[in-house]
Image (cartoon, rainbow, N blue to C red):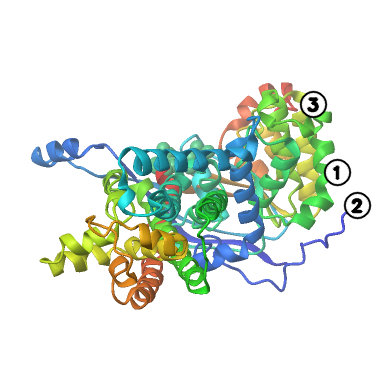
Amino acid sequence: MVTSIEVDNVSKTFSRHYTRTLQQIMVAKAKRKKTRDTFDALKDVSFTVEQGEAIGLMGLNGSGKSTLLKCIMGVMRPDEGTVRVRGRASGLIATGAGFHPQMTGTENIYMNAAILGMTAAETEAKFDDIAAFADVGEFLDTPVGNYSSGMFSRLGFAVAVNVDCDIFIADEVLAVGDQPFKKKCMKKMEEVRDSGVTLFYVSHSAGSVRKMCERVIVLEKGEVGFDGKAGAGIRYLKYDEDEDNDSANANDI
Amino acid sequence: MTTTVPPRHDLAHEPLRDPGDTGGLHRVLSHRYLLRLMVRREIKARYVGSKFGLAWSYINPTVRFFTFYFVFGIILQRGNIPHFAIHLFAGMVIVHFFTESFNAGTRSIMANKAVVSKMPVPREMFPVASMLVSLYHTGPQLVVLVIACLATGSFAPDLVGLGAAVLAFVIVLLLGTAMGVMFSAINVLFRDLTRIVQTLTQMLPFSVPMMYPYTLVADRFREFPTLHHLYLFNPLTECVLLIQRAFWWTTIGPSEVADANRDGPVFNPDVAANFPDHLWQRSFAMLGFALLFLLFAQWVFRRLDDRIPERL
Ligand SMILES: Nc1ncnc2c1ncn2[C@@H]1O[C@H](COP(=O)(O)OP(=O)(O)O)[C@@H](O)[C@H]1O
Ligand SMILES: [Mg+2]
């Protein structure tokens, strides 16, 4: 087994800007109020992920999940500690990033794929898969500004799930889209997982985490509250109480 | 699946790396494909949905040229200087390239928020792409400029002029990139500073010898050599003079010289009067300065880069 991700004592602090204009800063200074206020989004987070593991990242809103994933993606850098990864990270995190409303679906596929790190040859090889997954028919040659919002997000998803990567990250993005499309996405993600890609899956749904992941990491106010087997993690979060509710929407994500 | 790309999942031989270590101008070069797509998208997006399309990039500078010709050549009678419209327009092309690279570069990271806050690309990419788009739009302006030169009937381009034009463009390219890179980051973190500098750049067209001839500057500053030096310390002054050496000076034939109103305050058909001493030495010094400034801009960018995604 090869280490895929190594997160070592990572902390990330944001400053909250209470005071914005120069005038406000002056007033605050004069009144001896704090002009800066910091906030720890991640506190001393450490864990290691082996290649091919599927991890459910759970925790309340604001517990630092997206921040942690951004550090793993390399978008943000931790203030303390180190993150090391092997291979290319991508996934359902930048769906539709770089889409230009006046460019056609095809042009946007190439653009978005390039942003996600694919070369022209890779995109060409995957193009039919992407087009089939997006399922927008002849709209592929019309500007995406004319797409319905469903088509727009399908196209973004289609590119993202077809990126050839080593670490696949899905951050609460399946909230949009209709049921059949969600199912299709889940199936595709299972395929990705089974192909040996490391999977990081953020979700509040115990059912889908149980289905997708063998390991769960729970963040609590920026700290790792739990790291272990999926079932135990879900029990730790006491999400099991909602299980009835969950199985009612077993396909929900 | 019909994948011709080999699978990437044999990672045993790949090292662990820092995912956030993505920045640097040198890395922009290794993302040439994405850069090309971004530049192409910007160029296409500008005229998309307009019937004339790319023709607009010829129409706009043509209209501008005729405005200059009309206002300065006919109404204001700057007739003292032969082909004053070309004198002005040539300078405009190069100043425009600079201000466009700077302004579009400054906005570039904010404009690409969606990408910047989600994907780890070298963020210098965005101002560099803006500069390349500006460079592309300079093409049609140069075409209009050359047509105007040819229309004078006395255009005699020479190799020295060509070299001067190339040097001017290289200097402005470096300076425009540097300003774009530096201020794309500054614009995210200290927005007021951008405002201040952009206000200053509005003075730029007046601070270079294009709306007035260099001879006038040399004349007025004769008593104040320090001011004269300061004036020439602006690298864009050299660039404007170089571009005028390439396009305007070469349209001045014997008949223009003969017609020159020697009593007039400004035009003297002597090279030495129309260009400062050591123009070439000065220009190469500016080239060196531009290179150093680009390195400085990259250094500033690196220092601010890590804070960009969280402040968008
Ligand atoms: N760019 C930022 N600037 C300031 N605070 C931020 C920024 N991004 C996130 N935060 C704060 O950090 C905390 C964690 O955010 P996030 O990682 O998005 O949580 P989650 O994804 O678990 O809901 C939140 O309280 C949020 O307000
Ligand atoms: Mg989140």
Q: Look at mark 3 in the image and give the residue it sits on.
A: A180
Q: Residue at x 56, y 42 (%)?
A: B57
Going by the picture, which residue comes out furthest to the right?
B2
Of callouts 3 and 1, which one flags the residue occurring earlier in the amino acid sequence?
A: 1
Q: How many marks?
A: 3
Q: CA distance from mark 2 to mark 1?
A: 9 Å
Q: Look at mark 1 in the image and give the residue it sits on.
A: A128
Q: Is residue B310 left or right of residue B50?
A: left
Q: Look at mark 2 in the image and give the residue it sits on.
A: B2
Quarter of image, res A166: bottom right
Q: Residue at x 50, y 62 (%)?
A: B23
Whether the residue under disc 1 has CB within 8 Å of ligand 2: no
Quarter of image, res B30: bottom right
Mark 2 belongs to which amino acid?
A: Thr
Q: In terms of secondary structure, where does tag 2 sit? A: loop
Residue A31's place in the image compared with B143, above or below, is: above
